């Protein structure tokens, strides 16, 4: 006998059922991204209890990438938002990257419900922090599943309608009318989180950061476990003179949502900006540990993000993280990862480690053979190591693959000219110097070398 509970005809349940049925009558579609057959069966059962043909309205996949492909094909054709149930983890991967990319690309056109067995407060906050609309704990009853769907489809009351209108007005730039509508919301519900958020958005668009901060703070006080106002406050203070305030709000956000490694990376970046490299290192290391805990499949990307945030502020630390990123991704490296090798090569060359830079680029060539850019970079490293004859060999290989390489920037032609000059190939050197000056007649390094050769 089935242990699945039947949908109860209570007043609240009937209201939620009505919302869900209206959603499907308008052409709504559900996509389940899950490898848990018991959960997908529960979704199908619930649709059946609502007398819906799940074959017409329900799709499923066990692959995150397939979910993005499906969304790309269908979202723009739907009159209702696409509902997506996404497993928190599928095999060794997590849904974090998928949820972020879907919400960034489609916003409210997709409603994402993260599904997981761990319904701790930290996991629920992490789901909302990455952009999900709801968290669905497993196991779940049919009634609860219908309620979850209804609440992300249509929260719907007078205040919500006003809030939707105000948000539309802010987006269109009608700040005066948006402020009047948001003020009406606060008259009805003085502690409305979204009302204060919208007032903060209006003030920010006007350039009034003091008022924006005040409203975002009021939103934080109205619901202490809601992270969106804090994220707005962090975004409000982006300038070089805002580090202390940014640090304050980031620290609160990190305490509230400790599983989100992005916050720890941002904290590291702020401490770098304040000149506290030791504190920055501790946060970057903590971010690395947290990625390994909650989303190990994203470790390589996260390490690269850390290296980018470090930039030139701490070259040794940046080199450490970018080297680890390449090692972590070693089995899955592709052409899309060439920038990692290029960044690492730049850092090595800046430190005078031209031989290690050559090894770095040669390793990249095992991933993408016959890449003109990599061969050119090997040549540049040899130039910096004063191995001009070896540099010319690599430059010739690069130009054989891409003769237009010298047309990219004057610096490219100048570097090749330098190697020829050092090898006493005066005619070739002059040819490439003239190519550099054809791109930029005021390129001083080429003008100086050409003048020296004339003298």
Image: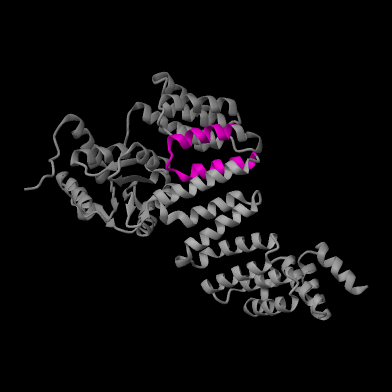
Q: Quadrant of residue 361?
A: bottom right
Q: Residue at x 56, y 71 (%)?
A: 363
Q: Is residue 450 above or below residue 58?
A: below
Q: Position of residue 256 (x, y in %)?
A: 43, 34
Q: Which residues are magenta?
A: 245-274
Quarter location, residue 220: top left
Name which residue lies at 47% across and 37% down.
254
Q: Which of 410/287 is in front?
A: 287
Whole-percent x, y for residue 224 in the image: 41, 28
Q: Quick check: is 251 in the magenta stretch?
A: yes
Q: Estimate the x, y position of residue 195 in percent, counting from the top left.
A: 44, 27
| Quadrant that contains the C terminus | bottom right
Vertical arrangement, residue 414 with respect to residue 150, above or below? below
Main secondary structure type of the part rendered in magenta: helix
**What residue is shown at x 39% (from left), y 21% (from top)?**
189
The residue positioned 13% from the left and 44% from the top of the image is 4
Give the total of numbered labels.
0
Identify the image's colour scheme: rainbow, by chain, secondary structure or one colour. Answer: one colour
Q: Is residue 174 visible?
A: no
Q: Quadrant of residue 146?
A: top left
Q: Nearer the viewer, residue 59 or 27?
A: 59
Where does the image place residue 45, in percent across and percent down from the top left?
16, 48
Whether residue 131 is visible, yes or no, is yes
């Amino acid at each position: 006998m089935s242990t699945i509970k039947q949908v109860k005809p209570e007043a609240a349940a009937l209201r939620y059922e009505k919302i869900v049925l209206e959603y499907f009558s308008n052409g709504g579609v559900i996509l389940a991204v899950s490898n848990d057959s018991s959960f997908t069966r529960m979704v199908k059962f619930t649709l059946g209890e609502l007398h819906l043909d799940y074959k017409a309205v329900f799709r499923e996949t066990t692959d995150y990438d397939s979910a993005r492909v499906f969304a790309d094909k269908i979202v723009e054709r739907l009159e209702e938002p696409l509902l997506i149930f996404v497993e928190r983890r599928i095999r060794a991967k997590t849904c974090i990257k998928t949820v972020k990319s879907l919400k960034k690309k489609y916003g409210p056109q997709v409603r994402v419900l993260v599904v997981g067995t761990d319904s701790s407060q930290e996991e629920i906050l992490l789901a909302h922090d990455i952009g999900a609309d709801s968290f669905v704990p497993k196991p779940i009853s049919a009634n609860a599943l219908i309620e979850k769907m209804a609440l992300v489809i249509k929260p719907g009351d007078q205040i919500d309608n006003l809030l939707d209108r105000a948000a539309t007005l802010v987006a269109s730039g009608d700040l005066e009318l948006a402020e009047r509508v948001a003020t009406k919301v606060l008259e009805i519900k003085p502690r409305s989180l979204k009302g204060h958020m919208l007032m903060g958005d209006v003030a920010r668009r006007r350039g009034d950061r003091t008022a924006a901060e005040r409203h975002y703070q009021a939103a934080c006080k109205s619901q202490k476990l809601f992270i969106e106002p804090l994220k707005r406050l962090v975004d409000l203070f982006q300038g070089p003179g805002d580090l202390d305030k940014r640090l304050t709000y980031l620290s609160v956000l990190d305490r509230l949502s400790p599983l989100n490694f992005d916050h720890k990376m941002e904290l590291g970046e702020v401490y770098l900006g304040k000149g506290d490299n030791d504190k920055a290192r501790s946060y970057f290391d903590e971010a690395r540990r947290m990625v390994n805990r909650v989303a190990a499949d994203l470790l390589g990307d996260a390490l690269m993000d850390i290296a980018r945030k470090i930039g030139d502020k701490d070259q040794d630390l940046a080199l450490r993280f970018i080297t680890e990123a390449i090692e972590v991704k070693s089995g899955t490296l592709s052409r899309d990862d060439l920038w990692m090798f290029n960044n690492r090569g730049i850092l090595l060359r800046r430190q005078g480690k031209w031989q290690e830079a050559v090894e770095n680029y040669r390793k990249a060539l095992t991933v993408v053979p016959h890449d003109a850019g990599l061969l050119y970079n090997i040549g540049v490293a040899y130039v910096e190591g004063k191995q001009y004859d070896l540099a010319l060999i690599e430059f010739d290989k690069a130009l054989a693959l891409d003769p237009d390489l010298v047309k990219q920037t004057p610096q490219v032609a100048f570097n090749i000219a330098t190697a020829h000059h050092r090898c006493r190939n005066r005619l070739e050197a002059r040819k490439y110097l003239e190519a550099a000056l054809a791109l930029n007649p005021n390129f001083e390094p080429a003008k100086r070398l050409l003048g020296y050769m004339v003298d």
